[in-house]
Every structure is written in C-alpha cells, then in structure tokens.
Image (spheres, rainbow, N blue to C red):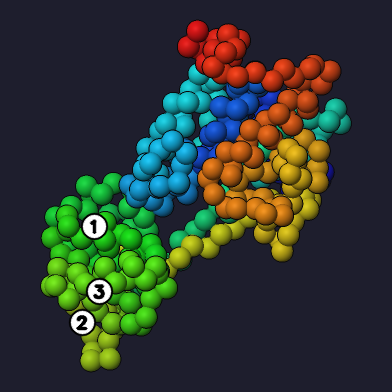
C-alpha cells in the first residue's frame, strides 16, 4: 500500500498498538470494546474534537429508537455509554486531527500518520470513518464566519443554549423539520424559512410543523436568506428576501440546514478498492478490505445487502475484531468466549 505524501509532517509523538481505529463514532467506539475483549489494544484517531462522530455532532439530543436494548437514547447518551463500555480497555484517543498517511511497513505492520504529527505503528487498521469528514453547506452571507458558534449554528449540541431565544431555522429537509419540532416549545419565538412551499422531509413532520404554523405557535416565511444583522458582533436579526420584498426577522440564533458535503479526503489515496469512489468494498466474513490487515466498518463500507444502521456497524466491528486478532497475534489460537461465563473476559472488563 502506497502512502500519501507526509515528508513535511514533523513527527511529534510515536505510538505502538495492536489496532489503530480511524473514527470515534459509535461503531469505532464499539470496535474498541470488541478488540479489548480479545486482549487487543487500540489507538483511536478522529478529525472531530470529541468522540461520538456524526451521532454526537449532528443530533446529540435527538432520540434514536433502533439501538438494541435501548428503546430510546440520544446521540450523546449513546456516545457516553459506549465510552463507558470501552473504558476498561483504556484506549488512547487522538482527537481533532485527520489521518493523512496509511502505509504498509516492510514487516507487514502499518504506519499511520496524522496531520498533527502523531505516528502510530499497528498490526491492523480499522477504518470507521462514517461517510468521511463532513462539512456543513453554508449560506453565502457577509459576516457569517464571525457569528459561527454564537449566533449561527449548524447543529444543536445543547438544547438549553437555545431556550427562551428567538430562533430562525432555514431549510426544508428532515433536519430542519426535526429541530423546529424539538425547539418549538422552549423558544421565545421560532420562524421557519424555506425558498419553496414544498419540503423534502417526512410528511408527518411537515404536517406537524404546518399545524403549528396554523395554530400561531410559530411562523413560516417563504423566501431566501439574504443578510445578517449584527452591529456589535452579536446576531440581532436576519433579512429574508421574499416576493413581496425584504422581511426582517429578529433572532439571536440562526440554524441554516443546507445539508452536508461528505469528503473522503486522504482515504482516496490509500489504494483501497472503492465503489463509485465513495465506499470501501469489504468481504462479509471479517469486513476486510482489498488490503489484508485493513478493515472497514460502519457507513464507510459496502457489500451486498449492506444496511446503513448503527446496529449493523456493531456486528461488523465484532467480526472485524476477530479478523484483526490473527494479524496482531499471529500463531496464537483465538478462543471464543462469552462475557457471562468467562472469568478471563470479566477480568479484562474489571468486573471480576
């Protein structure tokens, strides 16, 4: 496997481990647990500044209903539980940095280098990068960047930060509708702005939002975002262009939901077998890629019958961990054990 060019990256930290996991979303975190059960150490690298991936970044407080054994759980709560579950194995996290280089060493192990100069020597690699790094599509408005994180938000991480504020949500997809319904009861006022009177969201959500408009609980403005009003660096209002002329909407929070641009980035340089240049092809025995020792789990991979569900990624992580064992412990026999009856596994989990 060839490496992306990294000659100019100064190495500031060197680590050695059994498996390097690229991606700290739910599937990557569960992989840490599965690897730990097999006695394998892991280093986790993610481009985001905290664990949880898109699950925690995009919908930390939204309910998820299809995690086995948890009838309802938020994205952040699921992340917290997975971190607690993986905790006994003490994975090393290196967050806020992308992996630039993935190369095969002469001894068959792998050299992984991050943009921040972290070099990891590993027997196997798990790519659990979801859909790749994601960047919100931003409205082209003067002064937008200066308001990001204070008045302008592309995700809701803490619902309480929006309580009793005047909110403008822009968009016509599921994210826009879902957050309108989530924030409606706690906002001082809420306005939905969309350039069309047709929406790309679930019909039931659209109907509920329109019912709230009809009941006078919120406002809908048909138009396009045209400007920001922040005279002292604090968002005070937005201007919307409509057929009837400009409309000024008082707000302290603007949520533009224009979708996300997904980028594989350096993964494209790693000479893996890709489908449509976006998804990594794997087998269905251990979810290994075209490069032995490199595994892809979660939304980043593809195979016949693939379902893009978190629970599918959990299954893939378990089988990939068994596949990685043979690379990390060549010559050792892997004994299949159950956590309910194995004292060895219970010691690893620190519950014995």
Judging by the rendered image, the residue that carries numbered circle 1 is 183
State the mark number for residue 247: 2
Judging by the rendered image, the residue that carries numbered circle 3 is 210
Decide if residue 76 is in sight here: no
Q: Residue at x 20, y 82 (%)?
A: 247
Q: Secondary structure at mark 1?
A: helix
C-alpha separation, residue under disc 3 versus residue under disc 2: 20 Å
- Residue 31 is situated, as x and y percent measured from the top left of the image, at 59, 33
- Residue 321 is situated, as x and y percent measured from the top left of the image, at 67, 30
Q: Is residue 217 left or right of residue 128?
A: left
Q: Residue furthest toward the right?
A: 106
Q: Is residue 92 left or right of residue 182?
A: right
Q: Mark 2 Cα within 10 Å, few/some/many (few <14, many 20+)? A: some
Residue 121 vs 245, above or below: the answer is above
Question: In terms of sequence position, does the residue under pointer 1 or pointer 2 come before the other?
Answer: 1
Question: In terms of sequence position, does the residue under pointer 1 or pointer 3 come before the other?
Answer: 1
Is there a contact, CB below 8 Å, between mark 1 and mark 2?
no
Q: Quadrant of residue 180?
A: bottom left
Residue 217 vs 313, above or below: the answer is below
C-alpha separation, residue under disc 1 versus residue under disc 2: 22 Å
User: Nearer the observer, disc 1 or disc 3?
Assistant: 3
């Amino acid at each position: 496997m060839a490496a992306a060019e990294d000659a100019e990256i100064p190495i500031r930290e060197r680590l050695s481990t059994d498996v390097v996991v690229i991606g700290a979303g739910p599937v990557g975190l569960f992989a840490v647990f599965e690897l730990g059960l097999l006695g394998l150490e892991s280093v986790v690298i993610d481009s985001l500044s905290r664990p949880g991936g898109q699950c925690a970044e995009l919908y930390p407080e939204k309910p998820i209903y299809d995690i086995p054994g948890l009838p309802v759980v938020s994205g952040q709560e699921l992340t917290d539980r997975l971190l607690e579950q993986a905790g006994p194995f003490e994975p090393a996290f290196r967050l806020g940095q992308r992996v630039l280089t993935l190369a095969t060493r002469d001894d068959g192990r792998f050299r992984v280098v991050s943009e921040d100069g972290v070099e990891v020597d590993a027997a196997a690699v798990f790519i659990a990068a979801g859909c790749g790094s994601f960047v919100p599509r931003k409205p082209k408005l003067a002064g937008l960047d200066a308001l990001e994180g204070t008045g302008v938000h592309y995700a809701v991480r803490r619902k309480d930060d929006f309580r009793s504020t005047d909110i403008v949500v822009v968009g016509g997809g599921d994210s826009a509708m879902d957050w309108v319904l989530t924030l409606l009861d706690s906002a001082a006022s809420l306005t939905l702005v969309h350039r069309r009177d047709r929406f790309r969201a679930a019909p039931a959500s659209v109907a509920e939002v329109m019912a709230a408009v009809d009941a006078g609980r919120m406002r809908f403005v048909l138009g396009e975002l045209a400007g920001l009003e922040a005279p002292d660096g604090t968002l005070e209002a937005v201007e919307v262009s409509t057929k009837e002329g400009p409309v000024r909407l008082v707000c302290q929070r603007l949520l533009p939901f224009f979708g996300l641009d997904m980028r594989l980035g350096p993964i494209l340089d790693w000479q893996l077998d890709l489908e449509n240049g976006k998804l990594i092809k794997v087998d269905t025995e251990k979810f290994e890629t075209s490069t032995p020792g490199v595994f892809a789990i979660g939304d980043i991979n593809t195979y016949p019958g693939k379902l893009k569900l978190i629970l599918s990624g959990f299954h893939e992580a378990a089988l990939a961990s068994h596949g990685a064992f043979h690379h990390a412990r060549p010559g050792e026999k892997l004994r299949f054990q159950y956590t309910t009856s194995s004292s060895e596994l219970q010691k690893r989990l620190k519950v014995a």
